[in-house]
């Protein structure tokens, strides 16, 4: 039997960790690898989502629910290590007795410059096995459309880019997804709006195996930018789209693996980016899975029972609007276990 996946252990490239803050600095372990991107959210208080990465520098924090510039947070996340990370006593990581979730991805360390595009990156950290890269680049002095190397060797299906890292004030989170109407459309990670037509967002050009295009729309500006690029990998990462039906017997979305994490959003109507993961899931109960909104600082939602994680995908089972209105949804998912491993052995549901 042909191998179904080349990644038998997805936990080597993505993992979720839960912990409780104590108001002081601490080491968070159990990630299973040295992360290159960490996304942390307090589950029990209205605090920002905090994203840090090894390419820009571990203390350079951006917020998925805000369009503000990057902050230098000296008492936030302070170091990555071989099994997790170290954080200080900042409230986004360690308010006493509050509960936290962190989502962690492995790229390839601090990276090096990618010269494939018209703009050389400051540094690009690419993991071609898992299809994930971090690209840090500077648009200062540039004008018009530019291309930037992503290092993956295949075209990414999903890109989250934050510009204006060194700008005083707000700038746009640009999101590309292959399920949008075309590369002339974008979504904002910090907003809940439907896809918007803007030919200069991605230059109207889909990413290639070497570069993605950035336009000269006002939101890009001439500032430093970070882009998180994801390519689908069989049995590990899946970008998807589906049609909501507004019924309790909702859509089944095939991923080819048991999900560990997913994020979904409607593209033809306004609603939030909704995040789920297997650590906060419970066991597909009447109230699970617990969800967080990437574009809001809200506490965790615990009473919706929106979907079930299955061995080969997920099943919508709620007639509510959040993930199942009569709209087109797009999203991305990462695996806990492949549906069939490289030896042809099926994996089970929970």
Image (spheres, rainbow, N blue to C red):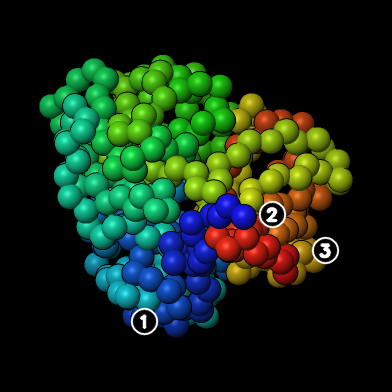
The percent coordinates of residue 205 (x first, y second) are 39, 21
Q: Identify which residue is drawn at 63% across, 36% down.
A: 241
Above or below 239: residue 16: below
Q: Residue furthest front?
A: 1
When asked about the image quadrant of residue 327, the answer is top right
> In front: 296, or 344?
344
In terms of secondary structure, where does tag 2 sit? loop
Which of the two labelled residues, at mark 3 and mark 2, occupies the earlier sequence position?
Answer: 3
Which of the two labelled residues, at mark 1 and mark 2, occupies the earlier sequence position?
Answer: 1
Q: Identify which residue is drawn at 52% across, 64% down.
A: 8
Quadrant of the snapshot with the C terminus? bottom right
Let me know if residue 213 appears in the view: yes
Looking at the image, residue 152 sits to the left or right of residue 104; the answer is left
Which of the numbered marks, if any, corresponds to residue 286?
3
The percent coordinates of residue 255 (x first, y second) are 64, 48
Pair 3/2: label in front: 2
Residue beneath label 2, please? 312
Residue count near mark 3 (Cα–Cα under 10 Å), binned few <14, some 14–19, many ≥20: some
């Amino acid at each position: 039997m042909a191998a179904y996946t080349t990644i038998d252990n997805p936990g080597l490239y993505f993992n979720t960790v839960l912990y409780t803050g104590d108001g002081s600095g601490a080491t968070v372990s159990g990630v299973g690898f040295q992360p290159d991107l960490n996304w942390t959210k307090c589950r029990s208080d209205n605090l920002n989502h905090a994203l840090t990465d090894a390419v820009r520098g571990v203390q350079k924090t951006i917020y998925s629910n805000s369009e503000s510039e990057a902050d230098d947070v000296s008492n936030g996340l302070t170091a990555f290590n071989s099994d997790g990370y170290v954080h200080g006593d900042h409230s986004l990581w360690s308010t006493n007795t509050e509960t936290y979730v962190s989502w962690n991805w492995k790229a390839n360390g601090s990276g090096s410059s990618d010269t494939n595009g018209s703009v050389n990156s400051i540094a690009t950290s690419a993991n071609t096995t898992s299809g994930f890269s971090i690209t840090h680049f500077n648009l200062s002095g540039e004008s018009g459309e530019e291309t930037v190397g992503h290092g993956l060797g295949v075209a990414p299906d999903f890109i989250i880019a934050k510009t204006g890292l060194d700008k005083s004030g707000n700038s746009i989170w640009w999101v590309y997804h292959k399920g949008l109407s075309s590369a002339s459309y974008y979504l904002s990670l910090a907003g809940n709006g439907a896809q918007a037509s803007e030919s200069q967002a991605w230059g109207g050009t889909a990413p290639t195996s070497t570069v993605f295009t950035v336009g000269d729309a006002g939101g890009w500006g001439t500032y430093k930018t970070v882009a998180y690029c994801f390519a689908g990998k069989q049995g590990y990462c899946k970008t998807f789209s589906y049609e909501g039906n507004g019924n309790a017997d909702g859509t089944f979305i095939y991923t080819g693996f048991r999900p560990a994490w997913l994020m979904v959003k409607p593209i033809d109507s306004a609603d939030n980016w909704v995040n789920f993961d297997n650590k906060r899931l419970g066991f597909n109960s009447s109230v699970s899975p617990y969800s967080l909104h990437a574009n809001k600082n809200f506490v965790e939602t615990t009473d919706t029972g929106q979907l079930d994680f299955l061995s080969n995908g997920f099943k919508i089972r709620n007639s509510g609007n959040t993930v199942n209105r009569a709209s087109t949804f797009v999203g991305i998912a990462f695996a806990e276990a492949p549906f069939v491993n490289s030896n042809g052995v099926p994996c089970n549901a929970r």
